[in-house]
Structures are given as C-alpha cells and as structure tokens.
Amino acid sequence: MKRETRAPLIVAIVLLLLPVLYVGSYFALVVPGGVPVAGSIGGGAITFIEHYRGQSGFCSRIFWPLEQIDRRVRPVAWEPLPVLDPR
C-alpha cells in the first residue's frame, strides 16, 4: 500500500496564502493621509510625510503596485492632511 504525499497540497496552500498576507500587511502598515515626521537636511528643519508605519522607504518599494491601485480606488483617503496654522 502506497501513501499519498501531501507536499503538493501544502505548497498550494502556502502559495494561496501569500497574496492574502501581502494585502493584509499593506493595509496594516499604510497610512493614506500621511503622518508628518520632522527632520533636518543640511541644518534646516523640514517636515516629511510618511505613508507607512515604520520603515517607510522599504515599505514604499515593496507595496508600490498595491499603493497605485489603492490611490485609484480611494483617492479621497490619499488627499494630504490640512496644515494647521500655529498662530
């Protein structure tokens, strides 16, 4: 009696879960309106807008295709936050 191998089933499940994990990670990390982050360049103060929670440079490269789709589907969410006047 020969046993069936379950390797193809396990590989199929993993391959089907990868897109779900990719999209889920995107929505867990994205901040469409942006978060202002203070920094400095050459001694001058500047404010950056980051659209991801942590590792924004890495996330913006990894999630670029999904972000382009999201910007087309939810354009209102991607509008910049209004700047408050400190006066």
Image (tube, rainbow, N blue to C red):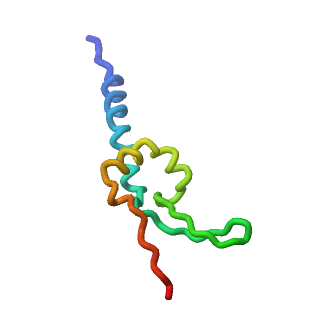
Residue located at (50% from left, 88% from top):
87
Q: Position of residue 80 (x, y in %)?
A: 42, 64
Q: Is residue 77 above or below residue 87?
A: above
Please tell me in which quadrant of the rendered image residue 7 appears.
Answer: top left
Q: Position of residue 10 (x, y in %)?
A: 34, 29
Q: Is residue 13 above or below residue 66?
A: above
- How many circles with numbers are drawn on the protein? 0
Q: Nearer the viewer, residue 73 or 51?
A: 73
Q: Name the residue furthest left.
A: 1
Q: Position of residue 26 (x, y in %)?
A: 40, 50
Residue located at (32% from left, 34% from top):
16
Q: Name the residue furthest right.
A: 42
Task: Tell whether 49 sits left or right of 44.
Answer: left
Q: Nearer the viewer, residue 14 or 1?
A: 14
Quadrant occupied by the N terminus: top left
Q: Nearer the viewer, residue 6 or 79?
A: 79
Q: Position of residue 24 (x, y in %)?
A: 35, 49
Task: Tell whether 77 sits left or right of 62.
Answer: left
Residue located at (32% from left, 59% from top):
76
Q: Nearer the viewer, residue 76 or 9?
A: 76
Residue located at (32% from left, 20% from top):
5
Q: Name the residue furthest top.
A: 1
